[in-house]
Image (spheres, coloured by chain):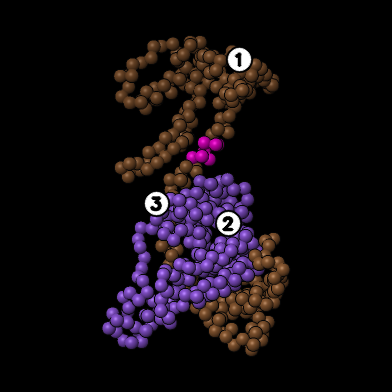
Amino acid sequence: MTPQNSAGDERDQIAAAIRGERDALRAVWEHNRRWVAAVVLANKPAWADVEDILQDVAATLVKKIGTLRDEAMFKPWLRTVAANAARAASRDLSHRRRSIPFHAPGEGDPMEQRSGSAPAAVEELAAQDMRQHGQRLLELATSLPEGYREPLLMRCVHGMTYRQIGEVLALPETTIETRIARGRRMLRDLAGEQKQPRELAPPASGPAAGVPRVASVR
Amino acid sequence: MATHPMNPSEPGRHAETGDQRGDQRGDQPADLGSGSELRSLLILRAAEDRCTEQDWTRLEAMAKAEPGLWHEVVLTRRDAAALEQSVREQIESAMHVDIPAEEHMVLRLTQRSRAVATWAGWAAAAVIGLAWLGVPMAAPQSGTRGGPSGQAPQSAGLFSSASQALDEYLKRGKADGNVVQQIPTKVLLDAKPSADGNGYDVLYMRQILERAKVPDLYKLSTDEWGEPAHAGDKIRWPLAEGGSTAY
C-alpha cells in the first residue's frame, strides 16, 4: 500500500467513524491511541494514571466525534481532547495513581544481590542505569514547555514520523524537527545539571526539584 | 504556517519551509540556517541516522573546531533510547484501553432518535396539533368517540399478559380500520448493563401506525415561550385529482 493509499484509507475510516460506524470507530481509536497516550503523558500531573485518563479520552471520542465536520481536523481535535483530559486530571483525585513506583537509586543494588557471573551483572546494572536514566529524563521532559514536550514524547512512540506529529499538532514538519532538536538539547542541559548517580553523588533533593522552568514557547 | 518558536531576529533562524528531500523514516529534512540551531539539528539527525551527505560534511567541519561534538551525538542517541524506553513502559499498560461499549450504544441511539424524529416530523406535528385542539381520534367507520367498535373494553383480568392484550388490540383495531399495522422496527432509546451482569436493560419505543378521520387540520406554530400553539391557518391540501395525499 502506497503512503497515499494509506492516508486515503485512514481518511475514509475517520469519515466512517464520524458517521457512527462502530468498527471504524474502534479501528481509528486503536490506530491512534499510542500517540494519544503520549500526549496524556506530556500533560498529566505526575501522580495521575495514564490508563484512567485514556479511558476518559476514549469516552469523549465516542460521545463527541459526531460533531466533527472535517476528517482532516480529527487528529488535532483528538489531541486537544487528550490534553484537556490530562489537565483535568489535576482537579480530579480519582485519577491519582493506585500504585507507587519504584526504587530509589542505589536501593537493592544488583551488584550486591547477584550471585551470577560478573559480565551479566554488569549488563544488568547497565540496563538498570539506563532505565533509571530514562525515568529521570521523562520527569525532566514533562517539565519542558508544552511546545517542546509534546513533540518530544510523541517522537518516542514507535513509528511516529515528523509528518505524523505535524498532523497532530497542525504544524509543519520542519517546525517539529526544530522543536525536537531544541527539546533534546534542553533535556541534555537539564540532565547534565544533575549528573548520573554513578558518576557523582546523587542530588540532595528529588530529581525534578530545582529544575529551572523554561519560558513558554507561546 | 506556524511561527518560529525562537526570536525571529536570532541569528541562525531555521527556515519554516524548505526543499522536500525524503529519507528512510519518512521525515523530510528542510533547508538549515546556521549557528546553534544548525548544530542542534545536525546532532539530532546524526543521532537518528537521518543525515544526508551534506549534513555529514557540515558535521565533520564543525567537529574539527569542536571535537566534543561527536560525544554529544552519542549522548543524544543514548538519551533518545532511554527516553523512548521509559515512555514505552508508561504507555504500554494503557494499550488495552478500548472504546466503551455503553457510550457506543448511546451514540447509536442518538442517531436513531434523530432519524425517527426526521421521518415522523410532519405526522407527529399533525398529531400534536389535533391533540391540542381536543379533536377526538374517531375511527373512520364506527363513528364512535374513543375506543374501537363501540364495545365495552374487556377487563384486564381476561388477558394473561400485556402482550396478549396488545395482540387483541391490534387484531380489533385492524378489523375496525383504525390500526394499519405495527411497525416491525422498535426504536431503542436507552440501554445500560443489567445490575446482575447478565445482558442489558433497554428502553424502547413500539410504533403502531394508526388511521383516523378528523374534521380539520391546522398549522402549528410556537408562542412567545416556545410552546406549540395554534397558528390559526388551516392546512390546505394541494390534493391530486381523484386522490388523497398519503403520508
Q: Residue at x 65, y 81 (%)?
A: B55
Q: Residues within 10 Å of mark 2 (few under 14, many from 20)?
A: many
Image marks 3 and 1: residues in contact by CB distance under 8 Å:
no
Quadrant into which the C terminus of chain B falls: top right
Q: Do the residues at pointers 1 and 2 share their chain? A: no
Report, in whole angstroms, how far the alpha carbon at label 1 lies from the one at label 2: 54 Å
What residue type is disc 1 on? Asp
Q: Which chain: purple? A: A
The boundaries of the magenta stretch are B109-115
Mark 2 is on which residue type?
Lys
- Residue located beneath label 3 in the image: A94
Q: In this view of the protein, which residue sits in the foreground, B25 or A38?
A: A38
Q: Is label 3 in a helix, a strand or a loop?
A: helix
Where does residue B205 sit, x and y in percent of width and height?
45, 32
Q: Secondary structure at mark 1?
A: loop
Q: Looking at the picture, which amino acid does disc 3 mark?
A: Ser
